[in-house]
Amino acid sequence: MKAETRFRAMGTDVHVVVVGGGRSLPETARRSVDDLERRWSRFRPDSEISMLNSFAGRPFRVSSVTRSLIEHAVDGARITNGTYDPTVLGAVIRAGYDRTFERLAGPGPGKGSDLSRGVEGIAIDPVASTVMLPAGVGFDPGGIGKGYAADLVVDELMKLGAAGACVNVGGDLRTDGEPPPGGPWAIEVEHPLRPSPAALIGLWSGAVATSSRMRRTWGTQGDRRHHLIDPTTGRPATGGLVSATVVAAFGWQAEILAKAAFLGGLARGFDVLAATGAAGLLIGDDGTVHESEGLGRFVRRSEAPPTSSVSREAGARR
């Protein structure tokens, strides 16, 4: 038996597919995603992330799930040698992304921000479950929140009796367990510039995530901006790519590696994947699809109905 549901949360479309288990599992998934949004949204003044940012320079007690999110983000910065940086919040705000995307309009920046970067200074106390950001530094859960949410919800569904589960949070997707008949789980990677998909990926268990500059854009025709900030410049990245898609074991890993590969561009994007043993594909500004070594073992060459799609829609970041 397969059950699925689609809903909006975290400022994006969420697609949940459950094989086996009780009929209430899709609704359980919805409640779990909503709870994580309440904890992690930087647009909710009472969220744990907003409170953490307001306490920068002082220890702030967080839930275990939020502490784990921040630990993964710090690990992501280390794994990618700082190409991925969860403390670019100030640059994101200065680029104009200072409110939910649905409310974002106008050609120029909204609020200013004096926040700087400083991921290496984040102090995490697992015993007290506190996190302290350096003074003047802001934490942005960004895409890793979506990838980690997919991980958490899949794990919860499996523990509650599902035979298999696939959770897609705005293009960050995680699968585990028994796929629908005709498996493996079939994940369609949509091409941002063409009607036909860029690839069809088959997974028995794992994750796929896409970072794309086509998802969240704003500004005038001559000053288009997007949410993928290059930490070295503090501005939206211009590396010659429209998107990067990565296959990894977990959603949070796939997300940070997709972002790092995108920021690396055609010149260095595949180096990021090679250094971590991940596989993926990069799509250049001209629409050309470039596959990494190792992606072939996941790509399905024959036609198969997709379980879910990544890089589909325009609202994919909180």
Image (cartoon, helix red, strand yellow):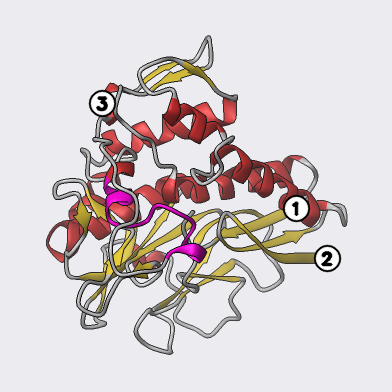
Q: Amino acid at mark 3?
A: Glu
Q: In this rendering, would 107 be left or right of 190?
A: left
Q: Which mark is residue 120?
A: 3
Q: Is residue 250 among the parts visible in the rendering?
A: no
Foreground: disc 2 or disc 3: 3
Question: Are circles 2 and 1 on residues that touch, CB within 8 Å?
Answer: no
Vertical comparison of 109 with 124: above or below = below
- The residue wearing badge 1 is 163
Vertical comparison of 294 with 128: above or below = below
Could you say whether the residue bearing mark 1 is in a helix, strand or loop?
Answer: loop
3 or 1: tag closer to the N-terminus: 3
Magenta-highlighted residues = 91-104
Could you say whether the residue bearing mark 3 is in a helix, strand or loop?
Answer: helix
Task: Name the residue located 57 percent from the left edge and 36 percent from the top edge.
Answer: 47
Image quadrant in which you'd find residue 263: bottom left
Among all residues in the image, which is located at the extreme top?
127
Could you say whether the residue bearing mark 2 is in a helix, strand or loop?
Answer: loop
User: Which quarter of the rendered picture does the N terminus lie within?
Assistant: bottom right
Q: Residue 90, position in %: x, y?
A: 29, 42
Q: Amino acid at mark 1?
A: Ala
2 or 3: tag closer to the N-terminus: 2
Q: Which mark is residue 1?
A: 2
